[in-house]
Image (cartoon, grey):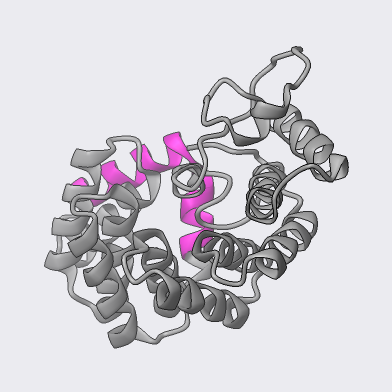
Amino acid sequence: MVLGASMPGRGFAARGAWLLSLLLVRVTSSTAQPSPGTCFSTDVSTSLDLRIDACTSLIQSKGLSQDRLAIAFQNRGIAYLGKGDTDRAIQDYDQAIKLDPKYANAFNSRGIAYQAKGDNQRAIEDYGEAIRLDPRNANALNGRCWVRASLGQLQASLADCNESLRLRPNNSNTLDSRAFLYIRLGRWNDAIADSDAALRADPTNAYALFERGFAKRHNGDLTGGDKDIAASRAIDPNAQMELAGLGVRL
């Protein structure tokens, strides 16, 4: 789920599917010129640069209704975030929210951007507002679950992950979020079970592999744990680096 190697943190360089659930975009080598519809397209072959150009043209045209203009800013922000430009992304999300204060996905997207910058408190606030506006926003619940777990707000984190999975069962990203939480709680068997489920949904989930390996080692299965950790490193060594930064160290 790659959006760009320069994008920091979980959900970014290695975890673009979380962001792609908001708008399907990825970097390609396309040399085509953007049409206005490119800004709103969910075509996964559309490059981030083309989407930015298309959205910029529409924004500057001043011909959009207020609600469509908010979507254009949101979609351009997602493309900027995909390129690792969190400051520009936040500026666009600010504009989208100013135009439509009830735009739950814009709050969720801004929460992702603040999380990428390491501003966890503002991320939690934006995820919370997205959830208030749209209680069924499974992405925002998962995002807040992860941030709360990283801050040690473990019971609140568990409630968020459970609700996200109730709304969207078997989602690999949310399952590995809860596996991370269970590791923080020392619930090794539960962490292994959630990692197993995450990997059934997405066998390339490097976070779930590392978490399962870590939990297996704490459960006494050193061979199985080392195998999972090696597989995680082969897919994405950044997973181990980020989890280590959050206290999940070998």
| Rendering coords of residue 248 (x, y %) | 41, 68
Quadrant of image for the C terminus: bottom left
Answer left or right for 174 relative to 76: left
24 over 153 or under it: above or below: above
- Give the residue displayed 34% in from the left and 72% down from the top: 135
| Rendering coords of residue 92 (x, y %) | 74, 57
Q: Is residue 241 magenta?
A: yes
Answer left or right for 187 relative to 172: left
Q: From which residue to which does the magenta span run?
A: 223-243
1 over 180 or under it: above or below: above
Q: Is residue 37 magenta?
A: no
Q: Front-most of 234 and 142?
A: 142
- Give the residue displayed 64% in from the left and 71% down from the top: 118
Q: Front-most of 146 and 232?
A: 146
Quadrant of res 139: bottom left
- Give the residue displayed 37% in from the left and 63% down from the top: 137
Main SS, magenta residues = helix
| Rendering coords of residue 209 (x, y %) | 31, 47
